[in-house]
């Protein structure tokens, strides 16, 4: 009787957590050495509805680094800060079909889209162009408004990536020689490494996702964080490119705009419906959280949430 008095959605999330806890496939990312220290057992699922209700199951208060889930927010921030024309003059919006760390640019020598590293570094460059040395804090504060609380940085993960991030540095210099980044490549990369090391929880990610799903209004704080225009464009590139070289399969099977990060997070935002945040550090070969994908698959099929199956 007690169990059945729980809200059905919470019962469903509990069942997901129990069903997928035995799933031990995948590997914790360790190409950034500090990320290798994550506890592979951690597993948290949080779901935020647009009336500001936040459901949490498992390790939803464990902090981890946002990594590539920062990309949609910094893209949206760049759109509102510099204007769409400036952003679109240097970053494309086509899926690349390439892994997240691909060094390949498009035929115009621009990044394919803002969801892969090249495009995200270009976005950090645009924010740097507008804000100079205040760029990182400008980003951190904006992400905090999406989460509804001030966010910190994991300095050890930041230092670890900065020390080993030669591939991203190579991308940065390639962007400069193609005039995507104006100058100050080293500073822009530090902004990018720091933004990737911002600490979040699965709960934060759910609220951030729900803010995307709610046309930019944080459903917990009520704040309009960025323009509805920037948010809809951001959801568009999440739909086409948010899951890297799994993006096509993802939108076909699950049908919810999403973004993953190598820290083990997945953010999924279903417009006008909900935001989901999951955390489980073991990743598949694309760099997507194995358990997180299972949770999204189960959520989409159980509640029939595919975005192209609506009436
Ligand atoms: N900071 C990471 C990198 O640039 C982010 C990658 C990711 O989360 N997919 O390699």
Image (tube, rainbow, N blue to C red):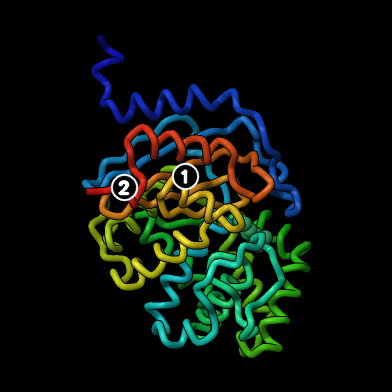
Q: Where residue 91 appears, x then y in whole percent?
A: 54, 79
Residue 40 placement: quadrant: top right
Task: Note whether 2 is above or below 56 in the view shown.
Answer: above
Query: Residue at (64%, 50%) from the top-left corner?
Result: 287
Residue 278 visible from this viewpoint: yes
Q: Is residue 204 visible?
A: no
Q: Which quadrant holds residue 160? A: bottom right
> In the image, residue 225 lies at what x, y percent?
31, 66
- Residue 296 in the figure: left or right of residue 36: left
Task: Please name whichever residue, 255 or 121, is drawn nearer the observer in this view of the structure.
Answer: 255
Residue sitting at x 58%, y 43%: 289
Q: Which residue is mark 2?
A: 309
Identify whether 69 is placed above or below 25: below
Quadrant for ligand 1?
bottom right
Residue drawn at x 55%, y 67% as measured from the top left: 95
Q: Which label's residue is closer to the chain start, 2 or 1? A: 1
Q: Which residue is mark 1?
A: 253
């Amino acid at each position: 009787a007690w169990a059945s008095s729980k809200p059905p959605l919470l019962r469903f999330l509990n069942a997901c957590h129990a069903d997928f806890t035995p799933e031990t496939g995948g590997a914790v990312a360790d190409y950034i050495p500090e990320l290798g220290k994550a506890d592979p057992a951690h597993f948290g699922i949080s779901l935020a509805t647009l009336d500001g209700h936040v459901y949490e199951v498992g390790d939803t208060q464990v902090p981890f680094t946002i990594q590539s889930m920062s990309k949609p927010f910094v893209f949206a921030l760049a759109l509102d800060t510099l204007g769409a024309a400036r952003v679109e003059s240097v970053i494309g919006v086509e899926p690349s079909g390439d892994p997240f760390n691909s060094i390949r640019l498009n035929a115009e020598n621009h990044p394919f889209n803002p969801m892969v590293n090249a495009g995200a570094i270009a976005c950090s460059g645009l924010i740097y162009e507008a804000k100079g040395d205040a760029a990182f804090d400008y980003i951190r504060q904006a992400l905090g408004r999406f989460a509804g609380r001030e966010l910190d940085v994991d300095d050890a993960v930041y230092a670890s990536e900065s020390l080993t991030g030669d591939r991203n540095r190579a991308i940065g210099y390639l962007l400069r020689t193609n005039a995507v980044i104006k100058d100050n490549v080293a500073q822009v990369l530090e902004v990018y490494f720091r933004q990737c090391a911002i600490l979040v929880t699965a709960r934060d990610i759910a609220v951030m996702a729900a803010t995307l799903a709610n046309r930019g209004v944080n459903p917990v704080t009520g704040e309009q964080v960025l323009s509805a225009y920037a948010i809809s464009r951001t959801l568009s590139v999440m739909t086409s490119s948010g899951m890297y070289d799994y993006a096509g399969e993802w939108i076909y099977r699950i049908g919810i705009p999403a973004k993953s990060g190598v820290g083990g997070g997945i953010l999924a935002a279903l417009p006008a419906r909900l935001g989901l945040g999951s955390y489980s550090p073991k990743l598949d070969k694309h760099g997507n959280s194995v358990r997180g994908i299972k949770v999204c698959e189960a959520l989409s099929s159980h509640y029939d949430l595919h975005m192209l199956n609506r009436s």
